[in-house]
Image (cartoon, rainbow, N blue to C red):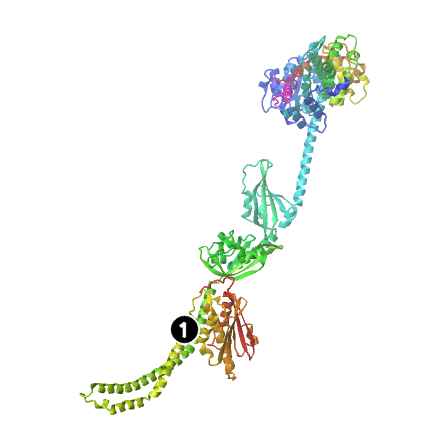
Amino acid sequence: MDSILESIPDLLDVVDEAVPGTRALARPGRPAWMLLADAQGRLLSLEEFHLAVDREAATRLAADLPARLKGTSTWRAPAPKALGSGRIVAARLKGLADERLLACGFTDPIPEGHGRDVLLAAVAGGIVKRGRDEATLRTRIDHLLAEHETLRASHSLAIAAVIEEREGRIRAEQEHASQLRALMMAAADGIVTVDETGRIESFNATAAEIFGYGPSEMIGRSISILMPVPYHLWWHDGGGTGIADGDARRTTLRREVPGCRKDGSMFPMDVSVSEVSLGSRRLFIGIFRDITERKQAEEELRRLHMQNEMILNSAGEGIMGVDRQGTMIFVNPAAARMLGWDVAALVGRSMHETVHQTLCDGSASPPGECPVCRTLEGDGRSTSGDEVFWRQDGTSFPVEYTGKPIHEGGQLVGAVITFRDITEKRTLETQLRQAQKLESIGQLAAGIAHEINTPTQYIGDNVRFLDDAFRDLIHVLSACRALREGEARGPEGPAPACRSPEGLARVFAAMDEADLEYLVEEIPAAIAQSLDGVRRVSKIVLSMKEFSHPGGHEMQAVDLNKALESTLTVSRNEWKYVAEVATDLAPDLPLVTCIPGDCNQVFLNLIVNAAHAIAEKSQRGEGEMGKITVATRRENDGVIVSVADTGAGIPWAVRSRIFDPFFTTKSVGRGTGQGLAIAHTIITERHGGAIGFESELGRGTTFTVRLPIHPNPAPRATRE
Amino acid sequence: MVRRIDEISTLPQIALKVMEIANDPDSGAADLKEVMEADAALSARVLRNVNSSAYAVRTRITNLQQAIAYLGLKQIRNLAMTASVSELFKRDEQIGNYRRLGLWRHLVSVGICARLIGLRRKLPTFEDAFLAGLLHDIGIILEDQHAHEKFCTVIASLEPDVPLATIERRVLGYDHTTLAEAVAANWGFPSAVREAIRHHHNSAAYRGPDIDIVRCVEVANLICTLKGMSSVGAKLVQVSLPALQGLAITKEDIQVLAEDLDQEIAANESLFQVGTERG
């Protein structure tokens, strides 16, 4: 409709062209009525002129018209007020050159009589001038009125169509709006719309529920009642940066803010805000969700996570998680510290390549044989106490670790490796072993001193006897020498005593005094006994040497029989008062690859224990000598060493504990409780052998050590 | 000839589409605009018509949307159809008293006159009356184009006292009303147009809802022929009393209409232009 109104020719232009000077009469702000007629006096239009011509001019024009119509008596100038309802809204004038009225549209009908008369008069004026007859004139008037009416009806129809269309559009919009409203009300999230000043315009049921307000309580109030200061300010954050009409823009994607209920209680909520521009107006749409439960769940999860983290972080043991490919996906700080890496740098690296690529002896550790890697092949739990891990700086440290596969839904997804740096443990162990060895030697020292003392004593006695005997012999020899000197001087010299029978007698007397026969008999015996004593001392010293420093800590082929003999020798003083020792050593015993020092230690522990066991029994009054039987024999690819005693036997109660460190039944000062524990470690861990015992109370105990001839796999070197 | 109707595709495709849209109650201004925009020359000519003195548009209308809003769907349809149909008359030719441009002038005049009669007889469908008038003798140009030689015979055989249709039937075996009606049905013209084509020489034979339009066209045909704007140059026209009576048209009415038609035709001079070339 607007376009039609706009397209109406400016009447004033038309009139001014037709009736020169009309425009000059126009006085803005002075409404006037005006009749328009063409030069022939034909009516063109009947207008209420708003801005145009003053009333006087209109009246003059109106008054002038009848004169132009040359006596047509039907025309009477209408009183301007009487035409007040004839307000033109649309008129379509032809150019004045066509000199005719095409159509007139009136919102209100032309008052009956006036308009008709005017038209009649106007048209009649034109026709009369042309001299046409009355019947044609009336027909023409009828035609013009009919045409006018038809066009107006058509026009009304068009308007009605436009109105109908507009109403249809409005209806559709309303329907759309109510659909949106229904959608909004039904939404599971709280929806609140807010104007630019932060006033709440509308909200849905969920929003009312979340915030605890009644159906219309929130309308018109500030959004700050829902979001305490300063959070509500962010409604204005987005600013008005030109978004197109109807476009929506998310100013703030999402935020978690505290919400405030009507009763003042606070709760965490999740808010997302969209900004919508509607014409010149901005509208904010906030979508709220009460996330109390989610928050609690998150908090709980966070707490659990913290707890786990704390446990993992504060664990003294290194903990590494690896995935199926052996890539580290988790490393706790202790592990990183031990390995000398940053946690972040370790994650993502191959576990094996990074920390376990080389064995302690410097040879490469093939992943296939790596027990950690085998964990990932589903071998189940694996542990080892004799591995090294490598630090970032290329140094290594001994570890004890446990690898445990992780299954998820029946699928192997990785493994957790827990490990400890056992350097300190190793050091302690070494120190303990050394202490125990020192203890053994200390214990043996008294016995050995005694063993050495005995031959030393009789060697001393013999030497003193030889000293006496030699002095006696000197006397005899002096007498003999004097006799010989007298003989040599002869007749010239006096020296009758020597040459004389008296000289001989003195020799004989000295010989008698020296008891030569005794000396001849005893001196060789004393010498033989002394030499034997020296041999015995040498043997003890040699045995001690062999026992204490038998070739370092390297594996070597050892004659166990010889080792056992040495051990028996140095420990003689421990057992000789309580037991006899019998040996049953296999003559064809093969050399056994082992660490001799360690093995001697074990044998000594067993022999001393045997002696102690017998001594214990003896002290209880069964004072006969016991017997210790040391035997060796070959068995398949190993060698069995057994030490049997006829002692008291091991009480049932302690049998399971005798290999435990620091466990001892001996009185304070007689044992540290380390002997058998160390023996167990040496035999099983270092040599891959076995140690066991059989015991019968009151009858004795037999310890059996089995050592492989060729330890396989090659045992690791010990660190001491 | 009638059997070959399917092959007759004289009317430009665009005209058929415009017709279809304008007669579809579910279509609107947007559809019409879309169809017409496909033919820039057509659109330009329609805009030129809209901006002519006949419509006294103060602000120049520069696009179809404005034009449709200003004049309405049916007027724009009429302008589009006029422009399209004018394509058929691009090559002027004269056969005896028959000139193609004469026929064109006859068609547009009858259209304008039929509309004028409709307006003054208060027919709400006065715009349809224009279309019916514009197309009522389309059969003649079809004969001219598709059966040219026989058509020449028809023209040559014209006698002052014998109606054209009679001679057509004699020469061709059919006449322009039956031919055009069949073609118009094929083209999907609205019924009022088809009935006007079929019965514009004899509205008394027609009983139906479109009777007023048929009568308007018959009377318009009469007036135009009397004023010398005939279809094939012949002056013969039978006055149909039932039509005049049906529309309550008196002798004075005819006189007034005939007089006013001159002004109307003058105002609509741009409609008579042939072809859609930009000019």
Q: Quadrant of the N terminus of chain A?
A: top right
**Residue A636 falls in which quadrant of the image?**
bottom right
When the figure is inspected, residue B182 is found, relative to residue A245, above or below; the finding is: above
Q: Residues within 10 Å of mark 1 (few under 14, many from 20)?
A: some
The residue segment tinted magenta is B39-62
The percent position of residue B187, horizontal first and vertical second, equals 73, 22
Instruction: From this view, report whether residue A278 is shown above or below residue A39.
Output: below
Q: Quadrant of the C terminus of chain A?
A: bottom left
Is B167 or B160 nearer to us in this picture?
B167
> Would residue B247 be visible to someone looking at this image?
no
> In the image, residue A192 lies at what x, y percent?
61, 44
- Does residue B249 show up magenta in the picture? no
Which quarter of the figure has residue B11? Answer: top right
A677 or B3, which lies in front? A677
Q: What element carries label 1?
A: helix
**Residue picked out by circle 1:** A542
Q: What residue type is labelled 1?
A: Leu
Asked where in the image residue B70 lies, by quadrant, the reply is top right
Q: Which chain carries label 1?
A: A
